[in-house]
Image (cartoon, rainbow, N blue to C red):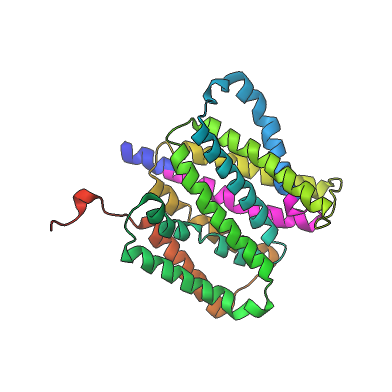
Amino acid sequence: MQNTSKSVWVLVALAASAMFAVVAPFTVIAEQAGLLPAYAVFYRYVIIMLITTPFILLFARSYFNFNRHQFWLVMLQACAAATLSLTYMASFSFIPLSLAVIIFFTAPIITLMVVPFVFGHRLSPAKMAIFFVAFLGLIFVVGPEFSNLNGLGISLAFIAAICGVIQLLCMSKLVKEISSIALIYSVHLMAMFISFFVLVTLIYTGNIAPPVALNVDMSVNLVGIVGFYMLAYVLLTMVAKYLQPATISFVSNVEPIITVALAIWLFNESFSNIQAFGVVIVLTALVAGSLYKEKTPNEQPAE
């Protein structure tokens, strides 16, 4: 019975990853209709706040009790979340979606390398090997077309990946100390204000056009962005209570595969043979990284 229950939650995690995967294509289609990614990010936060705030005020006000250390960690996570969304979605404007998603999903591999330094663990040869394989795969993916690619787009995707690591590290600390509801709501609320400040700055400096009225195509795709994102986030939060992080991480590897497949199908994107080989290498490193489990002190061989 327990195995059956676990299988159900694995399927739920799979569904959540699939829903996250379609957010990026919706963003690209929305941009083609005239909705810039930065505005799509901000509107998403605004809509989420409009939907959730009444329920928070009615049923969950008592959960918001942070100490100073927790407050600043929430702020850091919110900054990472907002920067992640803005840079990841903005990268779609400069490089192919399939390439952006492959670069972005090096975040779990970066996490594997960074965690030992953050928590004082040993950096094992296995972690170094996984990171090296992933980096080698990226060279195959980016290298052949590097001269034809926009450096800003590649940089934005890498910044998003780094922000993903920061967000995960903050979340892994905070989720053990405060309510998940309070954490998710607070992060999205702060991220909304951060996104607004970034947008105002970009508009004032002339780096982005002022917002335009939403047309039907923009609105439909914005509904898709918000709907799939919210549902995926809720499902993932539910799953986190029943599955180990390693299992969730492994299942989430379907997200880049689905996004790349959609990019090839919807936008006629393609990889050369050597780039496709690089994609396989990166995805293999992702799977290896999610399956990798550090030995506990009790499991170490006796001296």
Does residue 298 appear anywhere in the picture? Answer: yes
Does the rendering let one see residue 264?
no
In the figure, 16 relative to 121: above or below?
above
Q: Residue at x 62, y 24 (%)?
A: 55
Seen in the picture, residue 71 relative to 26 is either above or below; the reply is above
> Which quarter of the rendering shows the C terminus?
bottom left
**Residue 33 magenta-highlighted:** yes
Of residues 68 and 167, the one nearer the viewer is 68
Tell me residue 193's x, y (percent). 70, 39
Question: As drawn, is 48 to the left or to the right of 239?
Answer: right
Main SS, magenta region, reads helix
Q: Position of residue 160 (x, y in %)?
A: 59, 56
Q: Nearer the viewer, residue 276 or 110?
A: 110
Residue 49, image quadrant: top right
| Identity of the residue drawn at 73% across and 56% down | 29
Specify whether 234 is left or right of 43.
Answer: left
Please name whichever residue, 145 or 225, is drawn nearer the observer in this view of the structure: 145
Q: Is residue 178 above or below residue 272?
A: above
At a point 79% along the width and 47% down the height, the residue shown is 200
Classify the position of the N terminus by image quarter: top left
Which stretch appears magenta? 10-38
Would you say residue 94 sits in the magenta stretch?
A: no
Location of residue 113 in the rendering, given as x and y in whole percent from the top left corner: 41, 60
